[in-house]
Image (spheres, helix red, strand yellow):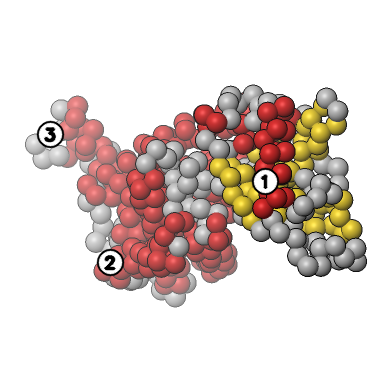
Amino acid sequence: MVLSVTFGTSDVGGNGGSAEAASIVVKIIEGLTSALVEPTKTQSNKSLKTPTMGLTLVSGIEKLMSPSFFKSENVTEMYSDIIIATLPKTRHVELPEPVNFTMYNKDRTGPVMKFQAGLVTCVYWKENGNETHWSVEGCTASFSNETHTVCTCTHLSTFAVLLQTGGQDNEEDDSLLEKVNLFCMCVGLAFLALAILTFLLCTWNPKVNNTARLHLCICLFLGHLLFLVGVSRTENAVVCAVIAGLLQFIFLSGFVWMFLETVQLFLLVRSLTKVQVIQKEGLKTLYLLLIGYGAPTVVVGVSAAVFPGGYGSKNTCWLSQKRYFQWSFIGPVGAILTMNLVSFCVILWSLRPTLANMKSDVSQSKDTRLIIFKIVTQFFVLGCGWILGFFQSSTLLKYLFIILNSQQGTFIFIVHCLLNKEVRKEYRRWFSCLCRKEGPSGDSATKDTVNDESQPTKDMDKADHHH
């Protein structure tokens, strides 16, 4: 038999916890559960290995039974609701064999960049004379994942799952990490805005199709901005659910556009290996738009139909961990990142003959460095750096993940805007207009064009911008 008891915040007092009050509440609930649960006909059989027990799920009592009652040098937080397990009509707590309790983890994770791992510990409420505290005696965490933890215990008592998230310096590290994340995302948003304006306002070569990278920048800009201002808006459940759904759609769209950018680049490189003259090819704009926004719409629509309550929680406006709902985002993202990584390796392999033929024409070392820089940067433009989100076991990896992926717009701006000769010419013309130095014919803005670039660099410019 499973009962549920919920305490409001005002019912349990302050955050410091009260061991005496908690013990009184636990004893009252144990008595009520034991009295309400009827023993089975075989309850008195001593050979019974799995006795019938009463389980009471208690919500809100965490304020009394604070994680501070657990002796640990780590920063500890409550990771589940509290359950009270008792046998009917008896105070006997010892069990002939260990029993497994499945405890659902509290929804504490946001998007991938907010994930934080820790040590999961199964504990019970131990009363030893005047000392009352959480203890691990007779209880172990036999299994744990993102949604639930299985505790194996040799006795009945009041159980909970605690999460230890590091030493005393952990809070300071988290605070610094949040500040770095905020700064990097603001910088990334600024460069994304510049890239969007450049793609919209600059005059591009007719052979250049900027559809994929333009909409990639738009999705990244809207996603990062909405994440900054909306992910913590949990006051209204409906608004929070809408924000979570929009974040899922926008970020999924961004990853689909990364994949389409990879496809465009692959088609271009394949043409480079066959002909010397670059001709316009690739997917048409209409097809790109249908795939770029149609695929995420299908994923979000199916996800919302299957589990409407999976959007938003009391802690964050993101996907719930219940029923593994977060995999409606992680699954497609993981598949896209894998395909992009494989495609990037194939592209590099296909470029080997082309780069080898270029070596004889490279007259300056800066051209070689520029080509290598563009190739390496393209790795992050295609989103392959997001793979670090699945490996957050150390502080260094967390910082690398935040810095590299928040600057995806910066990489796009540098490679496809600043390192493009035609775009630089447009920038000069704009700055000349702002400074009122441009003549009537506009010649003064175009005379300062770089004409001594080697052919390999020009080819790479064409290759990078021909989609």
Q: Which residue is mark 2?
A: 285
Closer mark to the observer between disc 1 and disc 2: 1
Please tell me how crowded label 3 is: few (under 14), some (14-19), or many (20+) other residues with Cα within 10 Å. Answer: few
In the rendered structure, which amino acid carries the disc numbered 2?
Thr
Amino acid type of the residue tagged 1 in the rendering: Leu
Discs 3/2, front: 2
Residue at left 58%, top 26%? 13
Q: Residues within 10 Å of mark 1 (few under 14, many from 20)?
A: some
Q: Secondary structure at mark 2?
A: helix
Cβ atoms under marks 1 and 2 closer than 8 Å: no
The residue closer to the viewer here, 66 or 171, is 66
Gap between marks 3 and 2 measured at Cα: 37 Å
Residue found at x 49% / y 59%: 329
Q: Residue at the spot x=63%, y=28% of the render? A: 171
* Residue at (34% x, 45% y) in the render: 239
Query: Where is residue 438, by image quadrant?
Result: top left
Marks 1 and 3 close (CB-CB < 8 Å): no
Q: Is residue 304 visible?
A: yes
Circle 3 SS class = loop
Say which mark, if any, is on residue 439.
3
Give the mark nearer the N terminus: 1 vs 2: 1
Q: Nearer the viewer, residue 290 or 208?
A: 290
Foreground of the two, 181 or 248: 248
Residue 80: mark: none
Q: Is residue 256 visible?
A: no
